[in-house]
Amino acid sequence: MDYLTKASKELFNYHPELTKRDDFEHFWHATIREAHQQPLQASRTRIDYPIHHVAVYEITYSGMDSTPIYGWMIVPTFLQKDRYPCLIHYHGFSGSRGEPSSYMKWVMMGFVVIAVDCRDQGGRTGNHAAYSSGFSLNVASKGIHNKYEYYYRYVYMDCLKAIDFACGQPEVDDSRIVVEGGSQGGGLAMAVAALDHRPELALVDVPSNSNLTERVGGMYGAFASVAEYVKKHPDKLNLVIENLSYFDTMNMADKITCRVLASVALKDETCPPLMYFATYNRITSDKDIVIYPFNGHEGGGDIQTEKKLAYVRQFFPSWFD
């Protein structure tokens, strides 16, 4: 048995008990219905960008509520096609949509790229949601006392509505949608792939938002803030754990129908790989995973990017004819 097989054996055998409540499906059906009742109010404004072979737009749309979600849309106009596959990027925790130059590898491949802020995190995107209680340290504990107010209920729907935005653009072929991200962004891509069957592929690196009870118990990454919240409100412990269960991607994994390429790093102490395998091992669609034995939360970096580019070409060659 080689080193990596031995080191990762535990991961592929990891099947913690699900924490899904009886009303899980009803909760998400009602949430999606509520999100779609909010008009999209989509807009795009072309900006003067120094690379003239692409068209770059600043975009906005209404998320689950009236919060304007800001992002970029980049079109590979140099290819002179009517419609293109679309890659939607979700960023890591405390990050943002970034700058258009970050996505040029995907544009050069032939994708329209849409990159969006998470509310309360991105440079321009705020948060119009009302919360009836405070939070500790960061937004991962915001609204955790009430599953209908929880921060990630809004963010999951904002990310789903990014697909609505994409499918409304004349340059986008809505049968060729990819969702992509790392860390928080990987968790968001997993959640969207479970809640919406339009994506054909999910590319997720060192994903978060999986096995959340253990994430809180170990005070890993952003979810350490939930543990801090419970320190201040110990009477809310059971309620908090129950509320988190609705947002745990391991409870959603059996709903994923698209192909998945994931990656984890064995020295990752922010999103430990064991936490993600609680989700990965329950995905029944076509899937592959890359394991980096000596990397931390940075994951595979550029090496993994190269693998993702090759993976897309391998399994979806007709998209780029």
Image (spheres, helix red, strand yellow):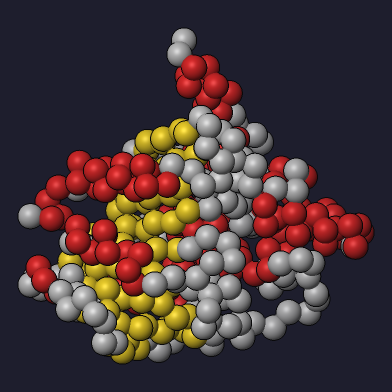
Q: Residue at x 73, y 79 (%)?
A: 131
Left/right of residue 188 with respect to residue 242 in the rendered view: left
Q: Residue at x 32, y 57 (%)?
A: 178
Left/right of residue 219 with respect to residue 187 in the rendered view: right
Residue 120: image location, x then y, percent: 60, 76
**Up-down relation of residue 41 to residue 143 (above or below):** below
Q: Residue furthest top?
A: 1
**Up-down relation of residue 76 to residue 249 (above or below):** below
User: Residue 110 falls in which quadrant of the image?
Assistant: bottom left
**Up-down relation of residue 101 to residue 129 (above or below):** above
Left/right of residue 109 with respect to residue 30 in the rendered view: left
Mark count? 0
The reply to whether residue 158 is visible in this rendering is: no
Residue 206: image location, x then y, percent: 51, 46
User: Residue 67 falls in which quadrant of the image?
Assistant: bottom right
Residue 191: image location, x then y, percent: 50, 56
Q: Residue at x 44, y 56 (%)?
A: 181
Residue 278: image location, x then y, percent: 58, 38
The reply to whether residue 93 is visible in this rendering is: yes
